[in-house]
Image (cartoon, grey):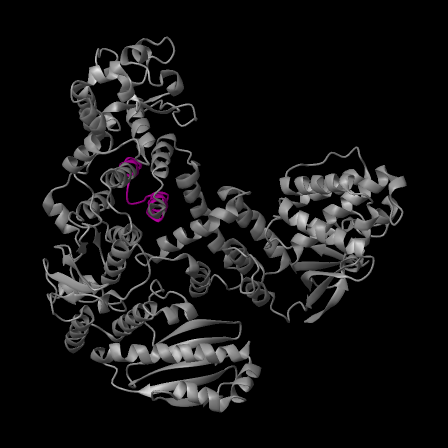
Amino acid sequence: MNAGPQRIVDLLTTASNRMVIPVYQRAYSWDEEQCQQLWDDIVATGRRGEGTHFTGSVVMVLDGTPDFSGMSRVLVIDGQQRITTLTLLLVALAEFARDNPDKVSHFSFEEVMGNGYLVSPYKKGPDHYRLTLSQGDETTLRSVIDHLENPDVDVVPEAHRIIENLDFFRSSLQKIDGANVVWDGIRRLEVVTISLAQGQDNPQLIFESMNSTGKDLSTADLVRNYVLMGLPMAEQEDLYANYWRKIEETLGADSYDRVFDDFLRNWLTVISAPTTVVTRDVYRLFKRYAAENDYDKPGHMAKLLKDLRRFAGYYACITAGACEDAEIRVVLGRIAALDVSVVNPLLMSFCEDYAAGEGPFTRDDLLSMLRTTESYLFRRSVCDVATNSLNKFFSSVIARLNAVQEEGGNYREAYEAILLGEEGTARRMPGDDEFERALKTRDCYAFRRGFYLLATLENSHHPKNPLDLYNGGYTIEHIMPRNALNRQDWREMLGADYERVYDECVNTLGNLTLTAYNSELSDASFAQKKARAIGGYDKDYLVISAALHDADTWDEGAIKRRGAGLARRALAVWPMPQLAKEVIESYRPAKKSAAPGRAVTFRMVCASGRIKPGDKLVATLAGETVTAEVTGSYTIRLSSGEEVESPSRAAIRTNELATGKHHSMNGWAFWHLGEGGPLLSDVRVRYLMDAEKTEAVDLKSLRAAFWDGLFSYCSDRPDFTKAYGDQSERWENSDWYVTFGLGLRDAHATAFYARRDGWVGASVYVTDFSLYDRLQARRDEAEALLGADGGEVVWNDANEKSRELLVKLPCDVSPERWDELYPWIADRLLAIRRIAGWLR
């Protein structure tokens, strides 16, 4: 690797080089804001009259030997946005010099075109152009340069950012007093060029390191780089054209960067079920999945990209209405309108299983399951059931349906049984009585899904030809207007108790409809609204407004009768699956004390009998006693009536309700079992000890439970979260060690739980030996920090590829000691964080 300063014009005009943006790089994405900043820097530099202006780094790889024409391709790993933008500015300068030769003296059109800034004049084909962009941008840039050389050539406006930014520079040149200053500024722009040797340096590591130094690399950038960068150029271009570009187009070429992260997280959730995936782990888990399945081996990446392309199609069907089947598209569109994105992995799983050919269910089954999903989500929304437990729930549903499919069971029946089996829990599907009551009494106007409710009710009468009610013309109309109490005619119609009737009915379902003439109907009397020539109720063709045609008055009785009728209709539009109790029970998972390799959950401890339904959980918060109750389904019911699944979530929410503040808390160390009873952490320890004795829990499960407790403890310490971040949603771990980032490329912290050997510890692990030498230079200070409160400090330099500074504490590591060990480990990790500060 070679690095050094260079003027950017020299980089652009090197005679034997042609700069190429590899296909794995992002498309050109700068907009006017970035162009304006570059323009300002160039103008300021040009006006200074002397000196240079540093504008960042350019990382390049020389792609092999020169071709038959003597040109070598230089692959731009970083800096392509600046180079492309400067190329557009040079095009604008060439045009300006050609059209205004009397206004420039420091440069000319002939100089720009003849000296290699934009083209190699005597080369043909791709070698004619000094810069080659990736697919999607290349056609437009070449047409711009061709048009510059020959105005009869039309510009291809496919890449709109290239056209828009070129127009920005054209406009800026027309406004500036003296274009010479722009040329002078460009001539003094300087970059640091970093040249990598093909086959020797690893551009992948450099590319990933950019993400830790403040460069805005999205998950899409990182994944595209990972799957393409290390391959031969011909294979890169083939995979990009046949797979990655198809994924871009499927997700939306202009917007896929924004949606790719969500798509990839959803895909990983499908293949990782029942484990949930958090955003910060997406790239790491993608790389791990690729490596574990050998997709990173030569010739195997196409299979992974083929899978991604297929799932991108499902995602587009679910979120963007791209489904070819009209009936399925309509139902998916209604689900999308509910805006509950955590259901998307489940829907993608449905699509994948259905697309398998002779799959586990038919098209009719798929439509039924989609409608059931819509009913499940909408009923919960109407009844104001919290959605915070659905992410993990839907992931578990995917895993359970996979098991049913493997066993040859009834997929559709199993899905319905799983939903119905959650009765009485936070994941329940509200029954008909609860749903109907909520529809008739709730405020449906302020309801975020009120328009969806009315539009879907209307289109339930037009299943084959649904009306386009989402075109922006229709709005929700109050039949009795919100200003009714200011009108004598409405007060008389509502009766003597008009204030109560107004308050109870104005925003209810019975008083709401849809209209394209809201402003025209406004606050008129009921008779005027009915008789109006355009938009009047007497002529309204919407079925949900049919009750208004023959009504002479619109009072409490009329509103409630219409509301009851619409609510009955809703029971049919959003139906509840019907299954026998024994069928539902047959799909309930058997209760187990602990699953191998899984953290011990509150539900597991309850299932063991140590915590029973009806037990009170008690804690002290800001000097006041707060309580919660264990439900029959082993959730925790808060004083507010909300139900949550874990002690920590219960503690966080209780604190939020009491103080209005949200922060992480260790619920196991917050709640007592009953007044004056043991902490839940003590109950969990006794469960683990008994489970260990009866071999109901294995070593992996103990490790997972240990780390789960450590993460909860650390997340409850502000000094730890400030240093390492919130650990409460960390990926589950059943290894004997876990790592923590130090913000250093070649170093990280590690914590250890050596169950078999009887010790815990922490270390700073480095792969750059110079960092280890710097640690040893402050050996006494390091040992004093790490050795406080006991522990043996070990300097480990036996490994040929790494070095380690370790502190270990021989101790009793059984579960009853864990709460004593967590503070020691956390303090050691914080000491390592201080030590890492010496290495920056």
Bounds of the magenta segment: 345-368
Task: In this rendered view, identify the residue nearer to me: 465 or 389.
Answer: 389
Would you place residue 368 above or below residue 390 in this image? above
Would you place residue 475 above or below residue 779 in this image? above
Would residue 221 be found to the left or right of residue 660 on screen?
A: right
- Measured from the top left, where is residue 343 in percent x and y? 33, 46
In the rendered image, residue 358 lying in the magenta stretch gets the answer: yes
In the rendered image, residue 495 lying in the magenta stretch gets the answer: no
- Measured from the top left, where is residue 226 in percent x and y? 53, 60
In this figure, what is the number of numbered marks?
A: 0
The image quadrant that residue 631 belongs to is bottom left
Would you place residue 528 above or below residue 688 in this image? above
- Residue 776 visible somewhere in the drawing: yes
Q: Residue at 34% across / 79% down in the picture?
A: 825
- Residue 159 visible somewhere in the drawing: no
Dominant SS type (magenta): helix
Would you place residue 706 above or below residue 300 in this image? below
- Measured from the top left, where is residue 393 in percent x and y? 27, 52
The image quadrant that residue 563 belongs to is top left
Q: Residue at 44% across / 43% down in the picture?
A: 313
Would residue 170 be found to the left or right of residue 367 on screen?
A: right
Task: In this rendered view, identify the residue nearer to me: 154 or 452.
Answer: 452
Task: Indicate the quadrant containing the N terminus: top left, top right, bottom left or bottom right.
Answer: bottom right
Task: In this rendered view, identify the residue nearer to me: 193 or 480.
Answer: 480
Would residue 93 be found to the left or right of residue 524 on screen?
A: right
The image quadrant that residue 314 belongs to is top left
- Measured from the top left, where is residue 121 in percent x and y? 84, 48
Q: Residue at 19% across / 38% down in the picture?
A: 577
Would residue 119 be found to the left or right of residue 382 on screen?
A: right
Task: Indicate the quadrant containing the C terminus: top left, top right, bottom left or bottom right.
Answer: bottom right
Q: Residue at 71% across / 65% down in the picture?
A: 192
